[in-house]
Image (cartoon, rainbow, N blue to C red):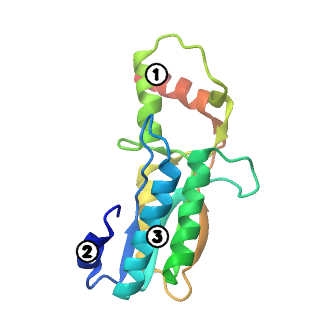
């Protein structure tokens, strides 16, 4: 998606395209601009290829809240996909995805397994609504079968609201 010339061939014959891209990496600056440009590239290619729908997995959070740069970028990407493509976008907004391969979950796993004692930053008190990776995959698969107007923003999450600190303590308990 960072090389727009590669996208037409990838979009050829595609009716529904998933956008599961995020350019933020540890220590990198300007990831927000890269995220927006990648989404614009993808949106244009989808429009030009005649894609009928885009399914996007973004981040949970109120547009009015003081969002972190990371969450703000996730929501901006959703807006760019809608505005630049004129293709209906089904946007799922999830908080932390719990399961192997989720960067947020892998961070929690690494902290718990490598640090027996930790001076906790403020973010460990942040409350979130975690969702299992299998549940996210079920939403993404089910979106293929949606009929009619499937465009919109859908907030997905598990049944509990917990802090990151509570998740770390729970993970530590389960790992024993």
Answer with mark 2 or mark 3, whichever residue precedes in sequence: 2
The x, y position of residue 163, in whole percent, is 64, 34
The x, y position of residue 90, in whole percent, is 52, 73
Please state which of residues 82 and 4 is positioned toward the viewer in this rendering. 4
Q: Could you give the CA–CA distance between mark 1 and mark 2, rounded to whole angstroms?
A: 40 Å
Q: Could you give the CA–CA distance between mark 2 and mark 3, rounded to whole angstroms?
A: 15 Å
Residue at (61, 19) in percent of width and height: 120
Element assignment for label 3:
helix
Choose mark 1 or mark 2, whichever is in front.
2
Q: Which mark is residue 40?
A: 3
Quarter placement of the C terminus: top left
Answer with mark 1 or mark 2, whichever residue precedes in sequence: 2
Tell me: residue 169, above or below residue 20: above
Tell me: residue 170, above or below residue 13: above
Q: Which mark is residue 10?
A: 2
Please state which of residues 160 and 80 is positioned toward the viewer in this rendering. 80
The x, y position of residue 130, in whole percent, is 56, 45
Element assignment for label 2:
helix
Element assignment for label 1:
helix
Residue at (67, 26) in percent of width and height: 122
Crowdedness of circle 3 by 10 Å Cα count: few (<14), some, many (20+)?
A: many
Q: Which mark is residue 138?
A: none
Residue 141 appearing in the image? no
Crowdedness of circle 2 by 10 Å Cα count: few (<14), some, many (20+)?
A: few
Residue at (46, 70) in percent of width and height: 40
Residue at (49, 80) in percent of width and height: 85
Q: Which mark is residue 112?
A: 1
Label pair 1/2, CB-CB below 8 angstroms: no
Name, please, the residue furthest toward the right. 64
């Amino acid at each position: 998606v960072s090389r727009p010339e590669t996208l037409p061939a990838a979009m050829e014959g595609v009716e529904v395209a998933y956008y599961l891209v995020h350019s933020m990496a540890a220590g990198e600056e300007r990831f927000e601009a890269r995220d927006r440009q990648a989404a614009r590239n993808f949106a244009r290619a989808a429009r030009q290829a005649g894609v009928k729908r885009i399914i996007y997995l973004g981040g949970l959070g109120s547009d009015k809240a003081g969002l972190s740069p990371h969450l703000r970028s996730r929501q901006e990407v959703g807006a760019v996909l809608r505005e630049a493509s004129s293709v209906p976008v089904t946007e799922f907004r999830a908080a932390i995805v719990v399961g192997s391969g989720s960067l947020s979950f892998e961070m929690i796993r690494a902290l718990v397994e490598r640090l027996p004692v930790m001076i906790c930053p403020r973010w460990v008190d942040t409350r979130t609504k975690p969702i299992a990776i299998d549940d996210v995959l079920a939403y993404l698969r089910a979106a293929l079968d949606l009929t009619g107007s499937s465009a919109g923003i859908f907030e997905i999450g598990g049944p509990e609201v917990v802090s990151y600190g509570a998740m770390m303590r729970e993970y530590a308990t389960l790992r024993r």
